[in-house]
Image: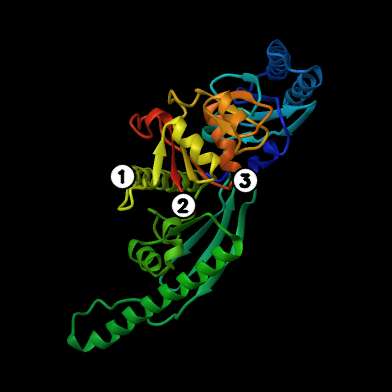
Amino acid sequence: MDLAFLHPLYEHSGPWASVYVDTSRHTESTAHERHLTASAMARRLADQGADEATCRAVENAIEELRRSSEPHGRALFARAGEVVLDPPLARPPQGDTAEWAPLPRVTPLLELADQDPVCVVAYVDRKGADFELRSGRLGREDAGSVTGRQYPVHRTSTVDWSERHFQLKVENTWEHNAAEIADALAACQEETQADLLVLVGDDRERRAVHERLPQRLQDRVVEASHGAGSRLLDEDVEAARAEHARRQAEAELERFLAARAPDAEGRAGAVEGVPALVEAAREHRIDELLVRADGPDTHREVWIGEDPDQLAVRRTELKTLGEQHSWAARADDALIRSAVATDAPVLVVPAADEEAPVGGLGALLRWK
């Protein structure tokens, strides 16, 4: 998961109010219920020591959701009387929560937020393809089309040996058109910076285009099990996105497990456990952070300074490093701050994977 959208949270010092609000329930009394939620969240923050201006900013922001039809919820991150970031949620949170802490409480957002990946859906047949751009923000947009050779594209039903030459021409037409479609689709992806390519059509045509796409795009492709002429519904696109995310997560977890073993020089390509991760974060060596939200290490206390690479297991370590000001923070929030600062992605590991990473936190490393 690319967390570049969180950069505004780390451009300011804390403490921070982190609030998650469920907006999935819609009844005649919704407006009144949201009013009660706004007051309750403000009181909860005040009880934890939040300043009055920040409590009021959060309360006002939730009040503005009184008549919102948002289907899931909203996260609110506020400090110094201002809501700095308020991303919508892709899934409802497990109840309304409010926390006041030195760092934003962002780990729940990893599982609840939707980065709204842009998809190019390619409707493929033997003669060419139509491209459609899909995302929650953009809806549906025409993204162009490509037309290949139009003749011959169909096999004959005869088995006469005299038809072999014609059948070979058909095969050549199919292969030519698949290559044309793949080239045009690669150009469309580069132009739109799409995160995902969804191929729709008969099995043979989808596979032929998939095989001819550049290697750099192979891990962005999902083949939808719809025949030629079908049009994908929003739920079909969402299913394709979920399948793509699942495959990527499995591949990255396998890479992490393999990288834990030391290489010929005795260096491991992955670490787990808070002390090793803190050291890697200080040295800017986290290439990808892995977080299992229910892991026991996620809420372990570490010490942080003003900058993202100023963190330590013990407070005295920061003083040794020359940091004069320090605060206690959760390990997951401190490590995510470091990952965002160095543009390292974060992988959410499902709770079912109880053995990896050990303690719930791990990282693939980069070596200088």
Q: CA distance from mark 1 to mark 2?
A: 15 Å
Please give the label number shown on residue 261: 1
In the visual, does 162 lie left or right of 102? left
Q: Which residue is mark 2?
A: 367
Tell me which residue sits at (81%, 21%) in the image.
Answer: 53
**Type of the residue with mark 2:** Trp
In the visual, does 5 lie left or right of 200? right
Mark 3 Cα shell of 10 Å, populated few (<14), some (14-19), many (≥20): some
Q: Nearer the viewer, mark 3 or mark 2?
A: 2
- Residue 61: which quarter of the image? top right
Mark 1 Cα shell of 10 Å, populated few (<14), some (14-19), many (≥20): some
Picture layout, residue 306 above or below residue 201: above
Picture layout, residue 52 above or below residue 160: above
Element at label 3 = helix
N-terminal label among 3 and 2 = 3
Q: Horizontal and vertical percent for residue 106?
A: 59, 31
Q: Who is closer to the viewer here, 228 or 47?
A: 47
Please give the label number shown on residue 4: 3
Tell me which residue sits at (50%, 46%) in the image.
Answer: 285
Q: Horizontal and vertical percent for residue 80?
A: 79, 26
Tell me which residue sits at (41%, 35%) in the image.
Answer: 272
N-terminal label among 1 and 2 = 1
Picture layout, residue 152 above or below residue 288: below
Asked whether residue 106 appears in the rendered view, the answer is no
Q: CA distance from mark 3 to mark 2?
A: 22 Å
Element at label 1 = loop
